[in-house]
């Protein structure tokens, strides 16, 4: 059994070292250097070079080093072996923090208070209770459910939208194309934790933003996207912000990453940009999770169902 580590965009050296430490006695190949393709049984990858995995005749399973598999599935030559993605409490907790931080910032009108402070104005603002504010979460998977629980614990009215119908205690659930209109029509803050698939690409567009509830204490609907940049049409978001259809946006992910220096999103007064770090996790913890998953697969336990990617749906 041997592992190929193929990583683009992050520092591969540290990952190769981690896996060598965690799997003493096994071969751990670095895809940047020559290796024997026939010896590779497992691959730990992040955005691997398209075609690389197709050249591994004895590959048994692929372990994606993140929760989203859109970059991996974009390779049309990807071999038909099981694919596992990351489901990890550390990653989930960090995404929950990012979502809650943003929701509270808008709900408690931090920007308006900061502006008053700048002008030395002792200005009190009307402040509704959390229960009177509706948070709509697109994506009720591992991350969406965790965010829903945290927001419910703070007292918000939480609604959720997914591909298939769900019943979740305390969450008003909607599903599919028919559910989208009613879901958006009573949402004040839209939290997006969807995967990027052919069905969700470009979903955060003018038509969707136009359907959100307009009247609230924040001056209009707010968008918080921690999913993927390909979900959003940035030109439509900018136009909605300038037109007032959207009051504000917090974006962790972008159509092009890193966000180009020329993007108007950087300096837009109603936009908060974070550099795809919402769920930046402890790499040692992730490497341990993957190592355990590889050992489980090797010993015949297969891939844990909550991490197994369904290639038909794309997540
Ligand atoms: P899951 O696979 O657990 O959940 C995905 C959710 O999206 C499910 O509820 C699913 O519906 C729903 N969904 C998928 N397609 C559609 C559709 N066409 N219409 C409506 N709902 C849909 O994923 P996670 O919660 O673990 O992660 C979500 C995404 O977050 C990842 O794919 C990744 O892109 C992103 N991410 C971003 C990070 C960052 O740092 N910014 C870090 C980690 C992840 P159903 O329940 O019916 O299957
Ligand atoms: C992920 C990410 O998918 O960090 O895990 O974006």
Image (tube, rainbow, N blue to C red):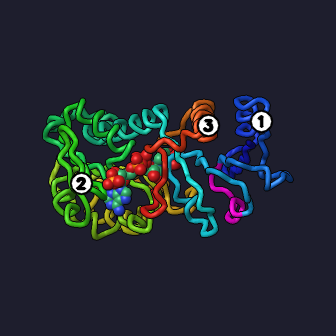
Q: Nearer the viewer, residue 303 or 189?
A: 303
Say which mark, if any, is on residue 165: 2
Q: Position of residue 73 (x, y in %)?
A: 55, 62
Q: Position of residue 115 (x, y in %)?
A: 32, 41
Say which mark, if any, is on residue 89: none
Secondary element type, mark 3: loop
Q: CA distance from mark 3 to mark 2?
A: 35 Å
Q: Of label 2 and label 1, which has the lower sequence position?
A: 1
Q: CA distance from mark 1 to mark 3?
A: 15 Å
Q: Position of residue 301 (x, y in %)?
A: 54, 39
**Front of the two marks 2 and 1:** 1
**Left or right relative to 307: residue 27:** right
Say if disc 2 is inside 8 Å of ligand 1.
Answer: yes
Say which mark, if any, is on residue 299: 3
Q: Residue at the spot x=62%, y=35% of the render?
A: 295
Secondary element type, mark 1: loop
Q: Which residues are magenta?
A: 45-54
Q: Can residue 236 be seen? A: yes
Q: Can residue 267 be seen? A: no
Say which mark, if any, is on residue 26: 1
Structural crowding at the residue carrying mark 2, measured as other residues with C-alpha within 10 Å and reported as few (<14), some (14–19) or many (≥20):
some
**Left or right relative to 182: residue 225:** right
Say if disc 1 is inside 8 Å of ligand 2.
Answer: no
Is residue 52 magenta-colored? yes
**Left or right relative to 40: residue 258:** left
Q: Given the current orientation, which residue lies at the most extreme right position? A: 34
**Left or right relative to 309: residue 104:** left
Q: Is residue 169 above or below residue 232?
A: above
Q: Position of residue 42 (x, y in %)?
A: 68, 47
Q: Residue at the spot x=39%, y=54% of the render?
A: 194
């Amino acid at each position: 059994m041997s592992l190929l580590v193929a990583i683009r965009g992050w520092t591969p050296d540290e990952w190769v070292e981690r896996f060598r430490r965690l799997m003493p006695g096994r071969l751990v190949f670095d895809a940047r250097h020559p290796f024997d393709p026939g010896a590779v049984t497992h691959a730990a990858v992040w955005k691997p070079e398209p075609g690389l995995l197709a050249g591994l005749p004895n590959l048994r399973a692929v372990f994606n080093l993140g929760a989203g598999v859109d970059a991996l599935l974009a390779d049309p030559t990807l071999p038909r072996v099981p694919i596992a993605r990351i489901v990890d409490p550390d990653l989930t907790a960090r995404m929950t923090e990012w979502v809650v931080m943003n929701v509270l910032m808008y709900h408690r009108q931090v920007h308006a208070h900061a502006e008053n402070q700048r002008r030395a104005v002792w200005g009190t603002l009307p402040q509704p209770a959390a229960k009177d504010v509706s948070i709509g979460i697109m994506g009720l998977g591992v991350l969406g459910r965790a965010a829903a629980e945290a927001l419910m614990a703070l007292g918000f009215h939480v609604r959720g939208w997914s591909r298939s119908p769900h019943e979740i205690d305390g969450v008003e659930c909607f599903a599919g194309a028919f559910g989208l209109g009613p879901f958006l029509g009573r949402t004040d803050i839209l939290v997006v934790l969807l995967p990027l698939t052919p069905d969700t690409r470009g979903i955060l567009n003018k038509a969707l933003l136009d359907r959100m509830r307009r009247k609230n204490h924040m001056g209009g609907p707010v968008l918080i996207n921690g999913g993927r940049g390909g979900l959003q049409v940035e030109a439509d978001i900018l136009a909605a912000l300038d037109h007032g259809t959207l009051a504000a946006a917090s974006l962790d992910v972008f159509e092009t990453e890193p966000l180009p220096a020329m993007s108007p999103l950087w300096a837009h007064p109603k936009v908060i940009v974070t550099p795809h770090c919402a769920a930046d996790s402890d790499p040692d913890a992730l490497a341990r999770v993957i190592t355990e998953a590889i050992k489980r697969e090797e010993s015949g336990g297969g891939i844990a169902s909550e991490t197994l990617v369904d290639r038909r749906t794309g997540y």
